[in-house]
Image (cartoon, rainbow, N blue to C red):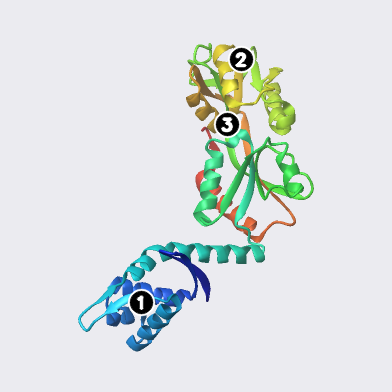
Amino acid sequence: MSHGVLSVPYRGGALAVDISPRAFRYFMAVAEELHFGRAAARLYISQPSLSHQIRRLEVALGTPLFVRSSRRVRLTAAGRTLAHEAPGALAALELAVERTRRSGSGRTTTIRLGYTPVASFGTLTGLLEAIQEDHPDLTVDARELFSAEIPERLHAGDLDLGLALAPAVPDGVAGEVVRTERVSAILGTRHRLAAATLIPLVELRDETLLLFPRRLAPAYYDGIVAACHRAGFTPRLRAFDDPPIHAMLSRLAGGREVGLAPASFAAHAAMAGPGVTHRDIGDPPMLAEFSLLWPTSGASPVVAELIAAVRRYAAHSWSGVASR
């Protein structure tokens, strides 16, 4: 950035001044050193050149910034104001210019992320950490949606990225599995299976299993049914038509149903609900797959970088099958 308008506070209001960042850096070096010779050496320029730049800045501002004498240099009241107030103003200006450049080049500064509610513990947190670590200047607009909705919203251009549970991927949308977890049981602490360390899948034969409606995550729902069939029984399923988490936990704590959810969600949900616990299901385990989704056309260039960042995070933190 070569120039920018800096708003400098003063007693009468605010003064808009055209100041180059270079001149401002020169000012700050002198303000910190309170010595033109040392400041010039620090900036690798001559002392006369530095003095000339400071005088030009003072003329632009219409006020002295330093009191100079043969023995010392000190800031005037205006100089102290500039040294205190201007860094934040200049940083904000530079950020605005950078964001404008990114927007003009297709590099958005806001990412619209749709995520399934069962990713809200653990998985979503990890994904956001991966994005913020590589792109701390990005703003993530995270929107809670059901898995079946996310591919449609990506295809329509309403989202930039999606995090869904076993989604069906339509034309115009790409995706890949980034995390695989066990499916865990959420049940009341007084339930007959609550004392078990691991619940064999066949032990759910006589239980009523509480799930979100199939339309919200069809592949996940069908995968649970198929796993039960392989274990030799047809599950007794009840759709939970009122999805809020606390309502589900209250129902499980007070009833005899067993909720099924990915392990990370189950562990945190049980911590949030009194009278509720969670247990892994095994022999064999049921698995839940979270996929990262993105549109195949019209995506901003930064989306490809975020996909790579999430892949790296997933390979380091989510490799293998997680039990929570």
Question: Could you tell me which residue is drawn at 50 percent across and 62 percent down?
Answer: 92
- From the image, state whether disc 2 or disc 3 is nearer to you: 2
Left or right of residue 289: residue 37: left
Rendered image quadrant of residue 100: bottom right
Residue at image mark 3: 182
Upstream in the sequence, badge 1 or badge 2?
1
Q: Residue 317 location, x and y as percent?
A: 50, 45
- Label 2 sits on a secondary structure element that is loop
Question: Could you tell me which residue is drawn at 72 percent across and 36 percent down?
Answer: 148
Residue at image mark 2: 257
Question: Could you tell me which residue is drawn at 61 percent across and 15 percent down?
Answer: 257
In three-dimensional space, the C-alpha distance between marks 2 and 3, rounded to whole angstroms, equals 19 Å
Question: Could you tell me which residue is drawn at 53 percent across and 27 percent down?
Answer: 269
Q: Nearer the viewer, residue 81 or 156?
A: 81
Q: Nearer the viewer, residue 46 or 15?
A: 15
Residue at the left extreme, as displayed: 71
Q: Residue 183 location, x and y as percent?
A: 59, 29
Q: Nearer the viewer, residue 193 or 300?
A: 300
Q: Which mark is residue 64?
A: 1
Position of 262 relative to 35 (above/below): above
Tag 2–tag 3 contact (CB < 8 Å): no
Position of 225 relative to 59 (above/below): above
Can residue 105 be seen from the camera position used here? no
Identify residue type, mark 2.
Glu
In three-dimensional space, the C-alpha distance between marks 1 and 2, rounded to whole angstroms, equals 77 Å
Residue at the right extreme, as displayed: 171
Identify residue type, mark 3.
Arg
- From the image, state whether disc 1 or disc 2 is nearer to you: 1
